[in-house]
Image (cartoon, rainbow, N blue to C red):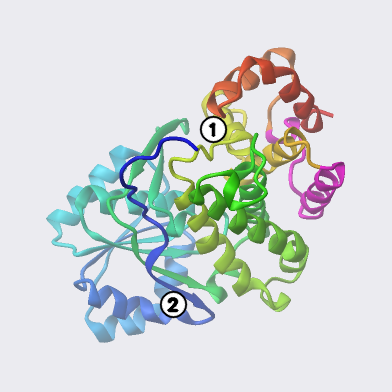
Amino acid sequence: MNDRAPYVNLRVGAGKFFYGSGCIQVLGREIARLGGRPLIIGGPTTTPLVLGIVEGEFAGLGIEPVVRIHTGACSRGWAEAYKKEAEERNCTVIVGIGGGKCLDLAKCTATFAEMDLICVPTSVATCVASSSVCIMYNDDGSPDGSVAMNKEVDVVVADTAVIATAPKRTLAAGILDSVAKYPEVIHNNSINSYRDCDIEKYICTVNSKAIYDFLMGEGCNVYDNGAESGRMTDLILTNLLHTSVVSGFSCGVNQLALAHGLYDCVRRSFTREAADMLHGEIVAVGVLMQLKFNGMPDAYVAEVRALMRHMHMPLTLAGIGIEPSKENINILMDYLIPATALTEADRPRLADAMKVIID
């Protein structure tokens, strides 16, 4: 076992997590409970949709929101600007509505302003709604590190009916982003019982395997049938809460592995080429590489690839805009080896694993 710190500060889950069809109706009273004066940061399509549903309740509670439709980057600069506005307008709570960019920006704004936070996810593309870290970018789309929140998200309102209106592309991306957790958690490790690792790592392993099994079993059904699948609410709980719990327990146990390592490298070194790709689409390509690197049976790779093909996802580096040239392959490998705790001795094994996303 590795030496352990004297204590660990886990920030896992959310203070309240509402989910199910129609739960958007609790938004007004949760805002009122947290002071009643919200600054809302949201996307141009989903924010009017949500506000249209709750406008009557807002009026009845006397809630007059400050609404900012955000189309720029999820940057520290924007978070500082919204913090300043929230303070100037005497707001008491930050509300994020939309996908990953708007929710991470709302989370960062609330962290900088030391205000309460409500997240209203409108897709399941990532687990950002209930994670306690804000992934930040520069204005050109390149990564700018992360901001750790000083507490969990106060409230998440994940309405099945609202999320079911999201494009299928975001649904596919979210499914594969969560599928990635299991092969990544066992990256370069052999974990068969709690005796093989720290308990945090074992919690990650057991839960990520449950997520993997559910999504591989129900992914096609939910993608094809949406709310009529009978599993959309289950998928919302899986992607937006269960996955973030795994991420929360992964802090400090080196969860960055090949799938998300590929994402990070692509955003840094191929920012322009992959600008139109969703987070989960890039991660999905990395999942195929991760499975091969882990030495898992070829049936695993074939099963995940079949799911991706069914959902019309990119399957190769070329599919996410990266020419598989020798130069580009070297850029990826030179980043992935140190970023995922590999050594130069692992380079041949990594090169072999990368073949599954080149051919």
Image position, residue 141 (x, y; %): 47, 33
Residue at image mark 2: 24
Name the front one of labels 2 and 1.
1
In this rendered view, identify the residue nearer to me: 243 or 53: 243
The quarter of the picture where residue 140 lies is top left
* N-term-proximal mark, 2 vs 1: 2
Compared across the picture, whether 1 is left or right of 297 comes to: left
As drawn, the residue found furthest toward the bottom would be 60
In this picture, residue 218 sits left or right of residue 281: right
The x, y position of residue 115, in whole percent, is 22, 58
| Quarter of image, res 88 | bottom left
Q: Magenta region: which residues? A: 297-320
Secondary structure mainly formed by the magenta segment: helix
Q: CA distance from mark 2 to mark 1?
A: 33 Å
- Which type of secondary structure does the marked residue at label 1 adopt? helix
Residue 259 is left or right of residue 156, and the answer is right
Residue 171 appearing in the image = yes
- How crowded pointer 1 is (Cα within 10 Å; few <14, some 14-19, many 20+) is rated as many
- In percent of the image, x 60 and y 44: which residue is there? 196
Q: Is residue 223 left or right of residue 20?
A: right
The residue that disc 1 covers is 264
Q: Is residue 359 shown above or below 229? A: above
Against 73, is 215 above or below? below
Residue 175: say if magenta.
no
Q: Are marks 2 and 1 in contact (CB under 8 Å)?
A: no
Q: Secondary structure at mark 2?
A: helix
Q: How many marks?
A: 2
Q: Amino acid at mark 2?
A: Ile
Q: Which mark is residue 77?
A: none
